[in-house]
Amino acid sequence: MARQHSRFLGSARLIAVCTLVSRVTGLARDMTMNHIYGQGWVQDAFNYGFLIPNLFRRLFGEGALSAVFVPVFTDVLDKKGRDAAWTLLGRVTGLMVFVLSLLVIVLELVVLAVYQWSDNEPMRDLQIGLTAVMVPFMIGICLVALFAGILNCIQHFAVPALLPIVLNVMIITGAIVIGPMFGNELKEQAYGVGLCVTAASVLQLIIIIPVLRRNGVRIKLSLDRNDKELRRMIRMFIPIVLGHGLLLLNSYFDALIITSLTQGPEQPESFSLFSMEIAYPLHEGALSAVYNAQRLYQFPLGVLAISLATAVFPTFSLFASRKDMPSLRSAVSQSLRLAIFVGLPSGLMLIILGEPIITLLFEHGRFDHDDTVRASNVLRWYGLVMTAFCCQHILLRGFYSLKDTITPMKISCWLVGLNLALNLALVWSLHEQAFGIATAITATLHVCISVWLLRRRLDGRLGAKAISLSAARTVTATAVASFAAWYAHDWIRELDLGDFGNTGIAAVRVFGPLAGAIASFFLISLILRMEEPRWLLRRVPAESA
């Protein structure tokens, strides 16, 4: 068991390093887009157009597909061997290509119908056009997610974690090189970026397929559904799509509400509803403010929590397949301790340093200080529940490893309505901050309910004493780190940094407090003799949590 714990922690570190590289290129992509397009209506339209294919990427890459495929594929690979596993893969791939192709055709027809009935408003037309351009992206990216899951099952993590770099580089290329070829106006150039998004999924497939072959994976496409394991996956897939899909629908509803309640160019200041004139509560840039805040909290989330969750999922699935419940409980408990250890300080740093970070990264070109304030106000709410976001990914994989897809679906169904109600209730007074607050409340409730129900599935034990003691020590270390960050932030503000230039000043105001916080956090964690730093920094076998 100790060997398995050491193995998934080593995998988590590898994924974290690779994910860090890809997330850095993601920041470069966001910096480029904000520099060229600003936090205005054209970028709002691009973010909306990218929303549907991106939701499918998250659904398949981080949710339903991996949740269904990894446990079943691991089970078949462990018990029946590689030939049976490759046969199952061919049937899953064939069915997936067929279904996704039909879905893309349907979505394109829907987009065409919506365009025919639109009011020819510039922002709405651009949203529709960019959606049509980027919808095919979902076929390639979902196949990439499937193949990445295969590589993870055979303990190959580097290439799947690095593949997002391709998308980031293509978007940067689209914004700088391809977009200007489409015209002088930003709304014309955005189509060039959209085409690069779709092309990125093709390039990712070209890269990952040879890697599969080098690792002995053989794919023979088949539409034969006469397979017991395939039918089992389909039965599991439906509730996961509903459950995780409903969770992701919160993001779609957020974007839909934001765009519907945003006053775009050439629009009046109010709209009519049941013969009443209602002022728009949001102004252009609202969706981009929320998107930028999400991208920033997803940076530490992807590098730390999702890397950990990706690495432990095959281990969870293997323990569950072998009915080794003590090892599964220990692995889940240890993973939650690590999620809290990395999530709590990351969230506090986003709250304290959110505005300086956005200033450093985005405040140039068409992105001004007012845009910084809007995005940082949303980011603080995401930072407040960063720990919940981190734990959420671990808990979902705990359920999925047990082939329990119904429970997460029910939790999501209970909360999606609450999220929608909170958005509509708060948007009129808190504007785009409402969407951060609603997400914070529902994510916290999701984790609380999930812990309670997963504990019951694991025979009433989840290592609560060890988790609580670790969490208390993490809170202590985080409190000291936060004080260090605040002190350094105030001290640096009093310094004369005029010779550094605007970018230099912004960098000092971010990295100075951040360095002090990180040093303080790890110093206190070592003084308190916490195990988590050793787990993260060295290949030391962890015992039962």
Image: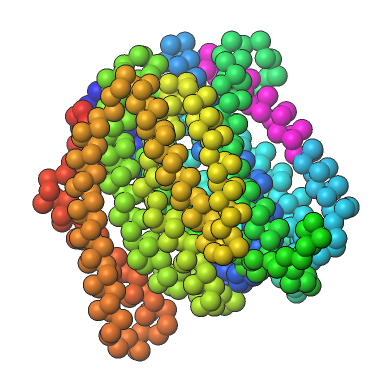
Indicate the colouring scheme.
Answer: rainbow
Please identify the quadrant where the C terminus is shown.
Answer: top left
The mark tally for this picture is 0
Question: Looking at the picture, how far across and down is residue 231, in whole percent?
Answer: 61, 15
The residue lying furthest to the right in this view is 116
State left or right for residue 118 relative to residue 294.
right
Q: Is residue 315 above or below residue 362?
A: above
Residue pictured at 52% horizontal, 46% vertical: 163
Q: Specify whether residue 97 is painted magenta.
A: yes
User: Magenta part mainly helix, strand or loop?
Assistant: helix
| First to last magenta residue range | 84-104
Q: Is residue 143 above or below residue 134?
A: above
Question: Looking at the picture, how far across and down is residue 243, in whole percent?
Answer: 56, 32
Residue pictured at 57% horizontal, 15% vertical: 232
Occupied quadrant, residue 496: bottom left
Q: Nearer the viewer, residue 428 or 67?
A: 428
State left or right for residue 202 relative to residue 66.
right
